[in-house]
Amino acid sequence: MAGLLARIRDYSRTPQGRRTVESVRRAAADPRKRAQARSLLSRLRGGRH
């Protein structure tokens, strides 16, 4: 698991990773996108049957 987190950290330090992080931050600030993400996570966790 530590290897995966290190790879994510390394990716986030690249120019493409920084663009991805900024894109995710903008999406997280949007209430509609936040609701969509919450719904998706709920389904992935088995919240809805």
Image (tube, rainbow, N blue to C red):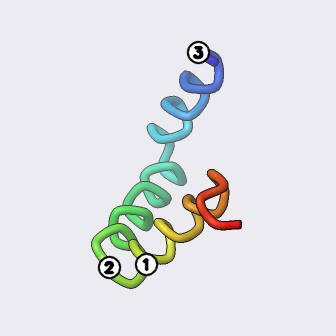
> Which amino acid, mark 1?
Lys
Mark 1 or mark 3, which is nearer the start of the sequence?
3
Label 3, label 2: how many angstroms apart (C-alpha)?
A: 31 Å
Where residue 43 appears, as percent x and y from the top left, is: 64, 63
Number of residue marks: 3
Disc 3 crowd, CA 10 A, few/some/many (<14, 14-19, 20+): few
> Which amino acid, mark 2?
Asp
Residue marked by disc 3: 2
Vertical placement of residue 36 versus 48, above or below = below
Q: Residue at x 63, y 66 (%)?
A: 48
Position of the C terminus, as image quadrant, is bottom right
Q: Residue at x 64, y 25 (%)?
A: 4
Label 2, label 1: how many angstroms apart (C-alpha)?
A: 5 Å
Q: Residue at x 43, y 51 (%)?
A: 18
Where residue 3 appears, as percent x and y from the top left, is: 64, 17
Disc 1 crowd, CA 10 A, few/some/many (<14, 14-19, 20+): some
Vertical placement of residue 20 versus 39, above or below = above
> Which amino acid, mark 3?
Ala
Residue marked by disc 1: 33
Where residue 34 appears, as percent x and y from the top left, is: 39, 72
Cβ–Cβ under 8 Å for marks 2 and 1: yes
Where residue 30 appears, as percent x and y from the top left, is: 32, 79
Position of the N terminus, as image quadrant, is top right
Mark 2 or mark 3, which is nearer the start of the sequence?
3
Answer left or right for 48 relative to 29.
Answer: right
Question: 17 or 26: which is nearer to us?
Answer: 26
- The quarter of the picture where residue 25 lies is bottom left
Q: Secondary structure at mark 1?
A: helix
Residue marked by disc 2: 30
Q: Secondary structure at mark 2?
A: loop
